[in-house]
Image (spheres, rainbow, N blue to C red):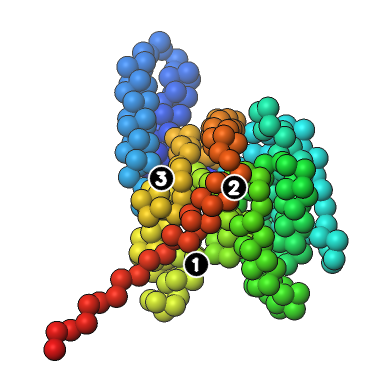
Amino acid sequence: MKHLLDFEKPISDLKRKLTELREHTEGAEVNLDFDDEIRRMEAEIDKTRQEIYSNLTAWQRVQLARHPKRPYSLDYISKSFSGFSELHGDRLFDDDRAIVAGFAQLGDHKVMVIGTQKGRDTKENILRNFGCAHPEGYRKAIRLMGLANRFGLPIITLIDTAGAYPGVAAEERHIAKAIAINLREMSLFNVPMIALVIGEGGSGGALGIGVCDRVVILENAYYSVISPEGCASILWKDRAAAPEAAEALKITAADLLELGLVDDILPEPMGGAHNDHDAAAETVKEGLIRHLEELLAIDPEERLRLRYEKFRNMGRFIEDAPAAA
């Protein structure tokens, strides 16, 4: 099996044995009945799959979020939306292909959809800069959000990035300022806004298109201020400690929901969204429509107030009580 993850090996081994059994049965010169054994192995595969995917660690979910066959933004745009018309450029420097954006239809609703986009192969990853946007990507995003706001179109963002591009060129063109402006402006738009984390949600690169009324996350996606490897290299001085860092960071969908950092978790097909793009896209479509219609029912001024309170309430610290004299 291509792109097999370590924890999926028991399932792969059982599938290989089942394939061998079926081939042996078909090639046997005498009429042998292995139907009972085949059914037993199929049940064992289902049981093993259920046990593995029902008890994934934080690091295993990070691996699923990064799976190269996982649906990306353009996959969801083509399957969950219709009538997509892509728009380009920041009107200042360039068109960053790490962010795709344009008008689209979500069910009965006309929307502006914006997403970070990775590549499937080396050539496309270079074109998309591995999904890590430059400043012009964030300027394109906020330009089109402003356009949507003027026309009263809801804004949907799809987040799947390891983070904003950290290179010299991005710093020269003021990546921190571009993201900061997005954070400010997104907090002020009157239209309904939904952010969906479909894979990786890395740091300011994700937050740059993530200040929305609702923040939703797929079951095996993650959202974090830093990657597990980055955290491990700082705190453990060893990137190999990434599994421990992933647990400590509380970056899984369930952790984020418990902490109040996301509003909803959308389930994925068994084994991850990469196993069934169509089913994942249908779940995304239904979830986005549900949240959008709930937001449309709220008065715009109240929606703005709730959005502001939502992000102001994130992050808490506890001070130790002063020692008694």
* Foreground label between 1 and 2: 2
Question: Along the line of sight, which residue is nearer the eye, 17 or 187?
Answer: 187
The x and y percentages for residue 102 are 77, 45
* Foreground label between 3 and 1: 1
Residue at screen point 75% across, 62% down: 139
User: In the displayed structure, does residue 312 sit left or right of residue 321?
Assistant: right
User: In the displayed structure, does residue 237 sit left or right of residue 148?
Assistant: left
Residue at which label 3 appears: 9
Label 3 element class: helix
Question: Along the line of sight, which residue is nearer the eye, 205 or 37?
Answer: 205
The x and y percentages for residue 35 are 36, 15
Look at the image and tell me whether residue 45 can be seen: yes
320 vs 188: above or below: below
Label 2 element class: helix
Residue at which label 1 appears: 226
Look at the image and tell me whether residue 196 can be seen: no
Among numbered discs 1 and 2, the one appearing first in the sequence:
1
Among numbered discs 3 and 2, the one appearing first in the sequence:
3
Label 1 element class: loop
**Amino acid type for the residue under numbered disc 1:** Ile
Kindly indicate whether the residue at mark 1 contacts the one at mark 3 (C-beta within 8 angstroms). no
Residues at marks 1 and 2, CA–CA distance in whole angstroms: 33 Å
The x and y percentages for residue 234 are 44, 77
Residue at screen point 32% across, 23% down: 40
Kindly indicate whether the residue at mark 2 contacts the one at mark 3 (C-beta within 8 angstroms). no
Dot 3 surroundings within 10 Å: few (below 14), some, or many (20 or more)? Answer: few
Residue at which label 2 appears: 301
Residue at screen point 50% across, 46% down: 217
**Where, by quadrant of the figure, is residue 29 drawn?**
top left
**Amino acid type for the residue under numbered disc 3:** Lys
